[in-house]
């Protein structure tokens, strides 16, 4: 970056220098031309006055070397020329400065000399008798002015170039310094970037930084939770099996202990399955398809799966609504409905009801699972989709919960670009609604 800025600054300096020098030469040459012409005019006035007073043209010797004087008669014939033999001179009435002088009283012209390096300046004035006096002199052309100035120009360019390198270096360092400082202060949220333009960039990096830290924290917490959750059933299994192994347990207790071991081993399996499922849903290369899936059909098969469970809990399972096709992964959607219904049964009351509703709003396919269960106190409602978050740990565990069911639900909902809504009142019941973005009309 430093090199790039440096190069740009030098390029700007180079271009500026060139343009400035060229413009200066042009401006100075303009001024020089004006000056030469103005000198010629003054001299021509003086000559005219003297000729008109004395009737004769006299030129001081010192001017003769520099100035050429031509006196042209009314008809164009040359009466006098200080630099040439008048006999060999042609009619001068066609010279632009002469034409202008005859018409307007005075005229001027600049013509290229034989050599490229010189220009000839002409100034002509009309006399009362109709004759014209013309003064001319040679002066450097712009090209020769440039050639003469070249060594000085090169010297100036070299000098300014050197100065530019030094200044560009200092300027670049000054420009970069706050950026380097900003990079060092990136994790200090209180330090504001010096350049306004950097604000969005710094904001984004800080946000990413915060997200990374937050993710790391969530992972750490999850690992600690997993360890704890796995440890509990394993401790029970080890304890009971050690007792049985010691041979000090009565036959009836052995059967009871074996039951406990079995229960905790199943719990371990369920836990491991849920953890694996979550990590699958978390991974980037999740194996899932997007196909047309009927939410109504899925709900019917979930009801089949949970029927026995519901009966055991004395809970009625019902399905209402109409078939709705969404684009999604069948397995994942089944899992979603299963987890919601499973919860609605497990956190229900004896004689309670669970209603699955499948319908459509204007732009969404709607799936809702409503129960008449124990409800969720408001202060817990925001957090129940977090991993391992449970309102009543005892009830969750005793009904075979892992604390991961709703975390899985949330993942599936996000994957389907759907939205989740929770409505619950303690003691009355809970309704969880999922709205899918795309609906496909049912094929006949
Ligand atoms: P769990 O395996 O403990 O059921 P979930 O992630 O499925 O874990 O649910 C998290 C917590 O949310 C549960 O422990 C329970 O306290 C609460 N919960 C979930 N669904 C319901 C429901 N339908 N009625 C009442 N509470 C619920």
Image: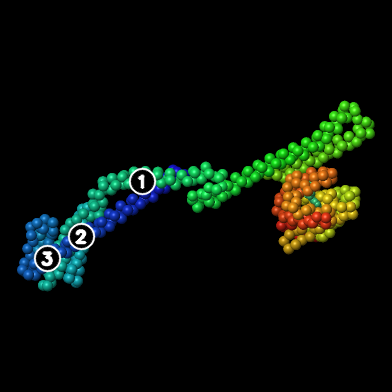
For residue 35, the mark is 2
Give how far across and how far down residue 183 sits, in percent: 52, 44
Give the CA separation, mark 3 to mark 2: 17 Å
Tell me, yes or no, if residue 231 can be seen here.
yes
Give how far across and how far down residue 408 sits, in percent: 75, 47
Give how far across and how far down residue 96 sits, in percent: 20, 66
In the depicted structure, whether residue 59 falls above or below residue 226: below
Give the CA separation, mark 1 to mark 3: 52 Å
Residue 216 sits in quarter: top right
Q: Quadrant of the C terminus?
A: bottom right
**Of circles 1 and 3, which is in front?**
1
Q: Residue furthest top?
A: 246
**Labels 3 and 2: the sequence-earlier one:** 2
In the depicted structure, whether residue 312 falls above or below residue 34: above
Q: Of residues 290 and 202, which is closer to you in this image? A: 202
**Labels 1 and 3: the sequence-earlier one:** 3
Asked if the residue under mark 2 is in contact with the one under mark 1, i.e. CB atoms within 8 Å, the reply is: no
Residue picked out by circle 1? 164
Q: Residues within 10 Å of mark 3 (few under 14, many from 20)?
A: few
Residue 142 sits in quarter: bottom left
Residue picked out by circle 3? 46
| Picture residue at 40% right of the left edge, 44% below the top | 170
**Labels 1 and 2: the sequence-earlier one:** 2
Q: Of residues 67 and 36, which is closer to you in this image? A: 36
Q: Secondary structure at mark 1?
A: helix
Judge from the rendering whether residue 149 lies leftward or rightward of residue 193; answer left or right.
left
Q: Of residues 195 and 162, which is closer to you in this image? A: 195
Give how far across and how far down residue 134 sits, in percent: 14, 64
| Picture residue at 77% right of the left edge, 45% below the top | 403
In the depicted structure, whether residue 362 falls above or below residue 159: below
Q: Residues within 10 Å of mark 2 (few under 14, many from 20)?
A: few
């Amino acid at each position: 970056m430093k090199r790039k800025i440096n190069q740009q600054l030098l390029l700007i300096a180079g271009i500026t220098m060139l343009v400035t020098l060229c413009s200066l030469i042009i401006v100075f040459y303009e001024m020089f031309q004006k000056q030469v012409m103005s000198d010629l005019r003054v001299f021509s006035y003086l000559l005219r006055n003297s000729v008109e007073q004395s009737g004769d043209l006299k030129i001081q010797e010192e001017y003769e070397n520099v100035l050429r004087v031509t006196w042209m008669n009314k008809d164009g014939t040359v009466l006098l020329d200080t630099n040439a033999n008048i006999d060999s001179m042609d009619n001068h009435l066609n010279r632009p400065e002469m034409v202008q002088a005859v018409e307007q009283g005075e005229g001027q012209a600049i013509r290229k000399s034989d050599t490229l390096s010189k220009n000839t300046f002409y100034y002509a004035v009309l006399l009362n008798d109709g004759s014209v006096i013309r003064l001319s002199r040679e002066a450097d052309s712009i090209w020769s002015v440039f050639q003469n100035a070249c060594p000085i120009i090169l010297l100036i360019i070299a000098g300014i170039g050197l100065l530019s390198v030094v200044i560009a270096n200092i300027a670049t360092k000054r420009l970069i310094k706050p950026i380097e400082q900003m990079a060092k202060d990136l994790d200090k949220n209180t330090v504001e970037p010096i350049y306004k333009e950097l604000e969005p960039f710094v904001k984004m990096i800080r946000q990413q930084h915060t997200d990374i830290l937050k993710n790391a924290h969530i992972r750490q917490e999850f690992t600690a939770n997993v360890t704890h959750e796995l440890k509990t059933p394993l401790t029970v299994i080890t304890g009971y099996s050690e007792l049985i192994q010691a041979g000090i347990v009565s036959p009836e207790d052995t059967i009871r202990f074996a039951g406990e071991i079995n229960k905790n081993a199943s719990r371990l399996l369920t836990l491991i399955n849920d953890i694996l499922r979550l990590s699958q849903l978390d991974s980037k290369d999740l194996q899932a398809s997007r196909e047309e899936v009927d939410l109504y059909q899925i709900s019917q098969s979930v009801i089949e799966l949970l029927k026995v469970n519901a009966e055991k809990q004395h809970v009625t399972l019902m399905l209402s609504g109409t078939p709705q096709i969404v684009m999604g992964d069948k397995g994942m959607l089944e899992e979603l409905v299963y987890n919601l219904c499973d919860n609605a049964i497990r956190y229900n009351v004896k004689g309670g009801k669970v209603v699955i509703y499948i319908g459509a709003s204007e732009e969404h396919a709607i799936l809702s699972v409503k129960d008449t269960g124990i409800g969720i106190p408001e202060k817990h409602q925001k957090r129940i989709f977090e991993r391992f978050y449970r309102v009543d740990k005892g009830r969750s565990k005793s009904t075979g919960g892992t604390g991961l069911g709703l975390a899985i639900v949330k993942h599936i909902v996000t994957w389907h670009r759907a939205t989740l809504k929770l409505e619950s009142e303690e003691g009355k019941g809970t309704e969880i609604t999922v709205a899918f973005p795309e609906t496909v009309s049912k094929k006949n």
